[in-house]
Structures are given as structure tokens and as C-alpha cells.
């Protein structure tokens, strides 16, 4: 399968190892991974702040760059949700758009539902881990059960993490509460954003987590900033890094 790798801006600029870990996982599954070097921001920050005219050409470029691939995979639920749930505003009726939406996947979606990854031989992570469920992933992509819905419990992230030797997933009091980042919300409502983030960190601490993981590096970036500012021993790692066999780095 020829896969187009869609990398969020903040991963590209600040957390490149998350992208490399994603590539390793996809290649392990037999995918032929390509990174279109012309790719830019998906337009989510502009759209979230009402700048639709500025976001539209980015959506059009995304359609042009990624349409040729068999699948498009991204290690970010929020960026994938932008493509699959909000690009209709710009691209509805455009040739190839319906097909592009259907073949664009968040990483855990792709690993569980498309290639159906069933083992991670040789991957070990002997740590207590708290799973943060990002809002876009739960409520737009349906990567797991959100607490307001009366349905059987499921989690694509937990399904994959269960394949890792030695890992212990801790039980949180509030499994799907927002971290408070919300992109520009963290700028316009800094105090509220920080309080929400510290609430999430406290929940992980109370559960005994050593590491917080998630499918969105934006959430983890926000939490990590608060953790470092408050001098706490917790670490954050994207789920791709754990699944690819990365280990906790010293502070």
C-alpha cells in the first residue's frame, strides 16, 4: 500500500521523532511510505479562528498533493478531523474529495482498522502509563468511547498499547476530559487553559502514571509545558513513540 504521510506543523517543527516513529510503524506493516515535501498546514488554526478564506487554499493544496495515494495517515486526530469533517466547507463537490476523505486516517485508526496490526514483537515499555484521550479523536473520529454516550467501551489506543510488553495502563478518574489546549484557546483563555491542564495532570498523578501518552502531540505539548513549569517528574510520549519501541528519555 502506498501511503502519503501527513505530518502536523508542530510535529514537523518541534517533535520530529513522532513523525519518524510513525514511519517505522507503517513500514513495519508493509506500507510504502512517502512524505510529500510540498505539504503545509492543513488550515485548522485559521479555520478555528474564523479565517476561512485563508484556510481554503490549504485545503485545495491538500487535495492535490494527497489524492494520488492509496491511503493518507497522520499521527494527529485533530488534523485528520479537519480533513474528514471540515474540508466540506471548501471542497464539497470537488473531483476526488469524497475519495480523499474516505482514505484519510488517524494513525491508530489505520493500524487497527486497515492493516489490522496484531503484534509488536520485541517492543517493551515497562512503565505505568496514563492515556489521554483527545477531544477531536473521541468526538469526531470516534477513536474510543466518550463518557456521554451509552455504548460499549472501546479504545483503539488501548487496543494497540495492549500489544506492548511490560506496559501498565493506569485507571483515571476522568478518562475523556479536555486538557485545555484547544489551539488558540490556550492563548485567548490562558488561565482557564492552564487550570484544565493541571487538572488532567493531577488525575494522572493520582493514578500513579509515570508517562502520559496520547494520539495528539498538541495535547501533550500543552501538558508537558505545565509539567516542566511545575517541576513534576511525569513524562509525555506520543503513542507512536511507545509503539515503535522508544524509551523514556531522562529529563
Image (tube, rainbow, N blue to C red):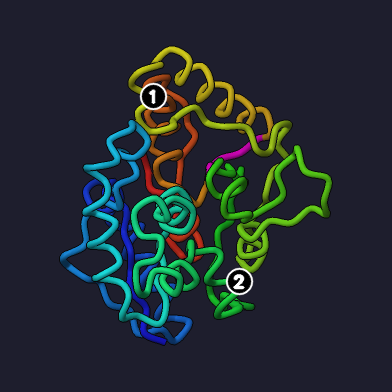
Asked whether, in this view, residue 19 is left or right of residue 214, the answer is: left
Residue at 64% from the left image edge and 68% from the top image edge:
163
Q: Is residue 204 above or below residue 57?
A: above
* Residue 129 shows in the view: no
Q: Nearer the viewer, residue 224 or 5?
A: 5
* Residue at 33%, 79% in the rendered image: 33
196 left or right of 221? Answer: right
| Residue 70 picture quarter | bottom left
The residue under the point 60% across, 24% down is 202
Q: Position of residue 159 (x, y in %)?
A: 67, 63
Residue at mark 2: 112
**Residue to which mark 1 is pinned:** 186
Magenta stretch: dominant SS?
loop
Instruction: Pick the residue in front: 43 or 161.
Output: 43
Q: Is residue 104 visible?
A: yes
Residue situated in front as seen by the camera: 38 or 119: 38
Quarter containing the N terminus: bottom left
Quarter occupied by residue 108: bottom right
Farthest residue to the left: give it. 38
Considering every residue shown, the one lying at the far front of the view is: 93
The range drawn in magenta is: 208-212
Amino acid at each position: 500500500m502506498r501511503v502519503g504521510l501527513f505530518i502536523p506543523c508542530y510535529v514537523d517543527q518541534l517533535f520530529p521523532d513522532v513523525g519518524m516513529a510513525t514511519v517505522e510503524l507503517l513500514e513495519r506493516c508493509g506500507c510504502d511510505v512517502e512524505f510529500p515535501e510540498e505539504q503545509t498546514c492543513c488550515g485548522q488554526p485559521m479555520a478555528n479562528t474564523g479565517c476561512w478564506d485563508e484556510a481554503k487554499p490549504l485545503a485545495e493544496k491538500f487535495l492535490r498533493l494527497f489524492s494520488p495515494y492509496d491511503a493518507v495517515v497522520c499521527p494527529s486526530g485533530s488534523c485528520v478531523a479537519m480533513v474528514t469533517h471540515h474540508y466540506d466547507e471548501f471542497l464539497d463537490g470537488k473531483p476526488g474529495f469524497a475519495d480523499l476523505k474516505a482514505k484519510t486516517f488517524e494513525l491508530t485508526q489505520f493500524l487497527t482498522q486497515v492493516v489490522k496490526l496484531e503484534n509488536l514483537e520485541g517492543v517493551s515499555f515497562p512503565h505505568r502509563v496514563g492515556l489521554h484521550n483527545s477531544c477531536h479523536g473521541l468526538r469526531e473520529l470516534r477513536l474510543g468511547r466518550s463518557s456521554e454516550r451509552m455504548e460499549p467501551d472501546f479504545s483503539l489506543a488501548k487496543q494497540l498499547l495492549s500489544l506492548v510488553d511490560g506496559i501498565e495502563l493506569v485507571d483515571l478518574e476522568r478518562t475523556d476530559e479536555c486538557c485545555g489546549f484547544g489551539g488558540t484557546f490556550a492563548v485567548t483563555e490562558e488561565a482557564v487553559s492552564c487550570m484544565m491542564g493541571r487538572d488532567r495532570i493531577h488525575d494522572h498523578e493520582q493514578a500513579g502514571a509515570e508517562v502520559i501518552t496520547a494520539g495528539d502531540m498538541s495535547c501533550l505539548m500543552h501538558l508537558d509545558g505545565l509539567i516542566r513549569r511545575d517541576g513534576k517528574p511525569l513524562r509525555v510520549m506520543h503513542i507512536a513513540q511507545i509503539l515503535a519501541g522508544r524509551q523514556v528519555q531522562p529529563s
